[in-house]
Amino acid sequence: MSAIEEPFAQGDSALHRRDPGLKILSAVAFSLPAAMVQGLPASGACLALGALLALLARLPLLPLLRRLCVVGLFVGFLWLFLPFSLPGEAVFSLGPLTATREGLRLCLLLTGKSFGIVLALTALLATMPITALGQALQRLGLPEKFCLLLLFTWRYIAVIRQEYLRQHRCVRARGFKPRTSLHTYRTYAWLVGMLLVRSWDRAERVHQAMRCRGFSGRFHSIVRFSRSSADWWLLISSLCAGAGLLALDIASRRGGI
């Protein structure tokens, strides 16, 4: 059975070796202030810091570009609508539509923040296995049910996808071709319904198997993490970076940048 791929978890960079719990705190310390900045200089700094973290993590380029393309698709929609929907000073016109300076500024702001935060979170969170993430969340005091839900979702979402693909192959082998018709809608409704039934049946069997093995509601890992001074320096640097973004944002707005 193939699990969900973790293309960034394998590596030996300085960020890969850091303690997972402190990496989670570092991600929060950087991403929350970055999401609150309202000025273009701070947004540009957020993007630069995110790119720096990605370089330090030595992330594989192709998977990273694929992930950024998803973000770029969302940002692209903003560039299609925001410049022409916000009132303000006109910059250029496309037929009946007029782009405003305020709309373009907002698009630049959101673009810098979005890519910067995604790069930072990928460098800090995606560089550890999901099992380490669940274990670190438990150590940070998050509810055990939440951590179990996260781990089970990661573990079995690939199983559910395989079941869906198997059923889809079955209906295609019987000559089904999707069209815009009532038969197609009924077929997909049947497919989704059977997927829910089989997933429920699989969940019951997994639960029984885990109880037979003595599962008491908590995962125990043999992996132990030891925190070093470098881990704490990462957290301190992230706190300073977040505070610096807020200070730059306040200074730029007071200075009219």
Image (cartoon, rainbow, N blue to C red):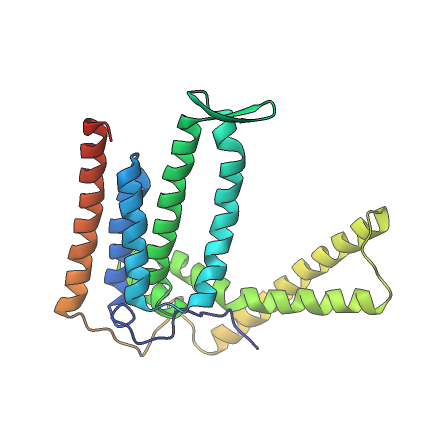
Residue 179 position, x and y percent, is 82, 51
**Which residue is found at the position 24% from the left and 71% from the top?**
14
Viewer-side residue, 17 vs 88: 88
Residue at 24% across, 69% down: 18
- Residue drawn 68% across and 64% down? 164
Answer above or below: position of 236 versus 216.
above
Residue 89 sits in quarter: top left
Image-based side of 108 in relation to 190, left or right: left
Q: Residue at x 23, y 61 (%)?
A: 22
Q: Nearer the viewer, residue 25 or 256?
A: 256
Can residue 42 be spotted in the picture? yes
Dividing the image into 4 quarters, which one contains the N terminus? Answer: bottom right
Of all residues, the one furthest to the left in this rendering is 229
Asked if residue 137 can be seen in this view, the reply is no
Q: Would you place residue 29 above or below residue 15 in this image? A: above
Residue at the far front in the pictured view: 92
* In the displayed structure image, the side of residue 3 where residue 115 appears, left or right: left
User: 64 left or right of 98?
Assistant: left
In the image, taking residue 36 as reference, residue 151 lies left or right, namely: right
Residue 159, compared with residue 45, is above or below; it is below
Q: Position of residue 133 (x, y in %)?
A: 35, 64
Q: Position of residue 98 (x, y in %)?
A: 52, 24
**Residue toward you, 161 or 67:** 67
Indicate the quadrant where residue 249 lies. Answer: top left
Depth check: 135 or 12 in front?
Answer: 12
Picture layout, residue 101 above or below residue 129? above
Number of numbered tags placed on the structure image: 0
